[in-house]
Amino acid sequence: MSNAKPNELIIRGVTSNGKTFRPSDWAERLAGILSTFDEDNRLGYSPCVRPTTFDGIRCVIVSKRLKQLDERAYNFVLGFGRENDLIIEDGDAQPVPSPIRNS
């Protein structure tokens, strides 16, 4: 069962063959790429890419809005999931397209 809501993707920290993805802080690292610091120097994750845990598995929630805001960032995040053979769930129950690659 998917935890993804409509207009979201979830990248689960589990490979297609069931192995837990390492390192254990991968979700924070990936979401941290698009994070910013506020005026109090506190790290804030983007509302479009944020780490979480579902069923004890580290995950990254990706808003499909990111594709409209920054297609390169969207492709990078999805590319990370695909290149590492991670499970990607679509809240709209659509097949997740491969990111566009520019050579």
Image (tube, rainbow, N blue to C red):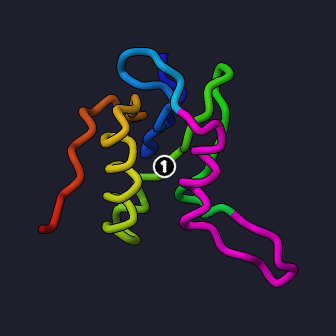
Residue drawn 36% across the image and 21% down it: 16
Using residue 101 as the reference point, say whether residue 51 is left or right of it: right
The relative height of residue 80 versus residue 3 in the rendered view (above or below) is below
Residue drawn 61% across the image and 61% down it: 32
Residue 57, horizontal then vertical, whole percent: 62, 26
SS assignment at label 1: strand
Magenta residue check for 38: yes
- Quadrant where the C terminus is found in the figure: bottom left
Residue 60, horizontal then vertical, whole percent: 55, 43
Using residue 83 as the reference point, say whether residue 6 is left or right of it: right
Residue drawn 48% across the image and 23% down it: 2
The relative height of residue 72 versus residue 90 in the rendered view (above or below) is below
Please say whether residue 89 is visible from this viewpoint: no
Write down the region rendered in magenta: 22-44
Residue 64, horizontal then vertical, whole percent: 40, 53
Magenta residue check for 28: yes
Residue behind mark 1: 62
